[in-house]
Image (tube, helix red, strand yellow):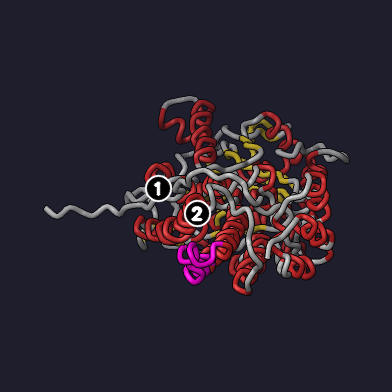
Amino acid sequence: MKFNLNMFLTTSSIFCFSRSMAFQSFTSSNAAAFARRTVASTSSSLSRGCHRLYASKATSFDDGEGPFYITTPIYYVNDKPHIGHAYTSVACDVLARFMRLSGRDVMFLSGTDEHGQKVEASAQKLGIPTQDFVDGVSVNFRDLLELMNVSNDQFIRTTDSDHKAAVQHMWDKLIEKGAIYLGAYEGWYSVRDECYYNESELVDGKAPTGAEVEWVTKEPSYFFKLSEYEDKLLQFYEENPEFIAPQSRRNEVLAFVKGGLRDLSVSRTSFKWGVPVPGDDDHVMYVWIDALANYISALGYPDEEAGSKFEKFWPASVHIVGKDILRFHAVYWPAFLMAADLPLPKRLFAHGWWTKEGEKISKSLGNVIDPVDLVEKYGVDQTRFFLMSEVTFGSDGDFSDEKLIQKVNTNLANELGNLCQRTLSMVFKNCGKTVPAEIGEYAEEDKALLKKAKDLKEEASEHIANQRINKYAESCISLVWEANKYIDEMAPWALKKTDPERMATVLYVILETLRHISIVYQPLIPSSANAILDQLTVPESERTFAHLESSPIKFGSPISKPQGVFPRIEMEVPQIA
């Protein structure tokens, strides 16, 4: 049975009626005809009519439709970037790209934290001005984002004049509200963590992170009245149970706050590299009150007027941080915002740490993982894929070159890459170097695979909305596996002589499945997914989620000779002397 344009128009007229009706119309006896494209205006109106269908998934903390503001922590510039920085940045990039493809207005912020005692000491050790030091190291982090193909909209530095002015305005607001007072600090302080610790928190004389601590003796300091926010924070956590994720991190924060909060020292006089306290140049602000304010200074705070960037994007949709800085974001930051009468972020997600072959990563062990080295050895998308798919996002993960090679070779080279190569090669050789011009009626097996392809975005959206990035990757991997199973069972190579029309139908079903896979895979492996879409002849203007069902691959589109997208990574075999 052949299909014509009139049948397509009949089908498309009811396509947007509902999700169930959309699929029903797509898998009826004239389903394949749906792939025929009508004039541009019809396609455009169909896309607009279905746009709501492709909004991101709504949750208790996000409506799934409005502006989406996501942030990395700003990275501390005392040393060069490592795998943890790459991990956080890529995770945020995946979420940001997914939301853009869903049609949302996204603001994605990253940057560098350039003040504090540790930074000043690092510059002094090198014998260079502190500003020159931070200028050089900040570039390394900006270069890392570019290397990892991270699509941040803005890169903020805490040495920016606009940021410093915003922080000083917030300080004045806290003074005005009576939330800050002058006193003196005495206690344990970790320069590495830029954090104060109680005696009870020390482990074998060190900070819980393993960092060295030093005793600060009666240093004048301004204090933030954190103790007054214990009950308010606990009430906020109770009323917003999904504010902190995953659950294990929420439990940590609850235990910490219930253990009692003490007023927080928020200024120092023993060093000068920081934002000066307004009206008291002897003091510079504690690095965290400075650093945390970047999330609002980047939006133009204190401009809160209607139509401002702040009004549009604040409160943040999600802050992504490492578990080592959870306390600052889950306790101090909400308390500062409460005191300043500013809205609190909607979500805070703290991910885990990486170990290497079972060992903690540290300079002393010489096992620090340089993301630049990973990209040079394995490729950008391959590195992104491994970091995001290897472990549950939120838990700790263990890195080894063997694990990366095995996962990339299995899921990308062998499964996705091979599926693309053999399908496109068959189309190129057996269909006149074009997408099949005509196909037959869909069999039940075809409909089943196309339904799974159609359902992929919805499944992925559910995972992304809850920051289950590894589960999103697993959904894509699973559909690739189903497509490989389908092509093996349908054996289009055997149909060439016995049933050419059936061969063409099977190949078209796989092409359409690959289109869905590649569009949904774009946030994770953007360059590779787009390379596949190029070979599938999908126009760049039709690669958003709104086009998943409205813009199937055109029959008869010419294709070029297929090129491999994922070369296998060869394991280095140790030489035996």
- Judge left or right: residue 85 versus residue 30: left
Q: Does the magenta stretch mainly form a helix, a strand or a loop?
A: helix
Amino acid of disc 2: Asn
Q: Which residue is mark 1?
A: 378
Height in image: 221 above or below 362? above
Residue at 65% over, 30% down? 160
- Judge left or right: residue 391 versus residue 310: left
Height in image: 302 above or below 132? below
- The answer to whether residue 489 is magenta is yes
Find the magenta span and give its range.
483-500
Dot 2: within a 10 Å radius of its alpha carbon, few (fewer than 14), some, or many (20 or more) residues?
some
Please name whichever residue, 301 or 91, is drawn nearer the observer in this view of the structure.
Answer: 91
Please name whichever residue, 567 or 190, is drawn nearer the observer in this view of the structure.
Answer: 567
Height in image: 219 above or below 274? below
Dot 1: within a 10 Å radius of its alpha carbon, few (fewer than 14), some, or many (20 or more) residues?
some
Residue at 59% over, 51% down? 435
Label 2 to label 1, Cα distance in Å? 34 Å
Please name whichever residue, 551 or 402, is drawn nearer the observer in this view of the structure.
Answer: 551
Mark number for residue 544?
none
Where does the image place residue 405, in percent across and percent down from the top left? Answer: 37, 56
Q: In the figure, residue 16 lies in which quadrant?
A: bottom right
Which structural element holds mark 2? helix
Where does the image place residue 483, in percent across and percent down from the top left? Answer: 53, 65
Q: Which residue is mark 2?
A: 430
Count numbered badges in the picture: 2
Amino acid of disc 1: Tyr
Q: In the figure, residue 79 lies in which quadrant?
A: top left
Where does the image place residue 37, in percent across and percent down from the top left? Answer: 73, 50
- The answer to whether residue 132 is magenta is no
Residue at 51% over, 69% down? 490
Please name whichever residue, 156 or 499, is drawn nearer the observer in this view of the structure.
Answer: 499
Of the 4 image quadrants, the one containing the N terminus is: bottom right
